[in-house]
Image: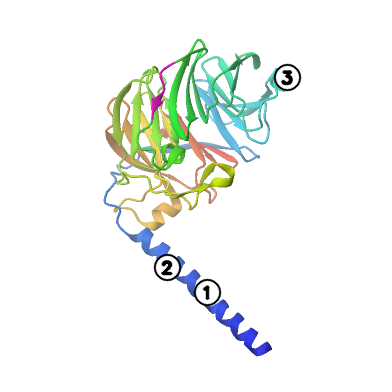
Amino acid sequence: MLNTRLKYLFICLIGSCVVMLFLQLFSIWKQSQPNGFIRLFPSNKIIGKEYLNLKLRNWYFAGIDSSGLYLGNWGRPGILSKITSKATEISDFKISGYENVGFYEGAYLRTEGTDLFLLDGVKALIGKGSLIAGKLKKTESVPYFTLGLPISSNNYILRTVKGMQSYLIATANNKLSVPLKFDGQKEGIFSTDGSLLKAPRANRVFYVYSYCNQFLALDTNLNILYKAHTKDTISKVQITVSKVASEHKITMSAPPMVVNKQCAINDEFLFINSGMRADNETLTMNKLGSPIDVYNVSNGKYKFSFYLPNFDGKKLTDFRVYGQSLYVLYDHYLYKYQLNF
């Protein structure tokens, strides 16, 4: 009896090892397959300048202007950190009025000019105040949202969900625009996940899809100016979802193929950290850095690409661009690059 059990255990062990080996080899094979596109890599497009040890992890960008950039930290709600434009000094200040509102723990800070915002899609609230004073002065009720972008002190772009479908709406002085429905929602809200950005002085809003090679350029009233495609060839969302009938919800049943990761924008260019490897890139290049594709804001045309190298053995977690300055978060580090174009 004991020998039989040992034999079964040995067979199970060998079988699991074979399966793991097969999956690893399949992953390596899949990564080595051509994806049907190439990138242009002109030399010397970025120049490394300074870096700053932020000590803590879990940072996110709250805003950026000529004086520097503002960071929030998921572990320190209600506190905003300002970093000088040279990325050499950091100072913290507590947001006055935050503790009196009772925001959800996932609420996040945003700045736009001299305005300060605290966005809470779960409670459908936006706190507004003065960045200079570091104070929230009032709270505005809005529709429930999954993504929010302040345009001005009384104008926001929100991504909302209704009937398992995603929409963009614009709010201006408490008035709602006609919802803009996303195309291609066969997999529900997951298929239209993405990033929402505003060009600083171009009066344009961009929505970059996470799981397919498309992005939209819109005006602040959500009129579509143009549709464009990223450099890769993934035109259809490649995700698998499952319905949980008992909880009346759908979930992803497998890790999705992320086509477009973090995004940033300045007056002239849209920057996208791509999750896809081009045919003229090696696996080593992908392991040692992150490809950034550059597109023209005016027409969505691809210009070229460059790599942001890993720092201290870590890939970027997010990045922002202001003018010719590019700021990158690597875990608990902030690195500043100078754009050479």
Q: Residue at x 29, y 56 (%)?
A: 34
Residue 77 at what x, y percent from top left? 67, 30
Magenta span has 178? Answer: yes
Residue 334 at what x, y percent from top left? 55, 37
Three-letter code, disc 2 = Leu
Label located before the other in sequence (3 or 1): 1
Along the line of sight, the residue nearer the viewer: 203 or 49: 203
Quadrant of the rendered image containing residue 1: bottom right
Along the line of sight, the residue nearer the viewer: 2 or 313: 2
Q: Residue furthest top?
A: 173
Label 2 to label 1, Cα distance in Å? 12 Å
Magenta-drawn segment: 177-181
Q: Which residue is mark 2?
A: 25
Q: Please tell me whether mark 2 or mark 1 is closer to you in this view.
A: 1
Label 3 to label 1, Cα distance in Å? 56 Å
Three-letter code, disc 1 = Cys
Q: Which residue is mark 3?
A: 100
Residue 40 at what x, y percent from top left? 28, 44
Which mark, residue 17?
1
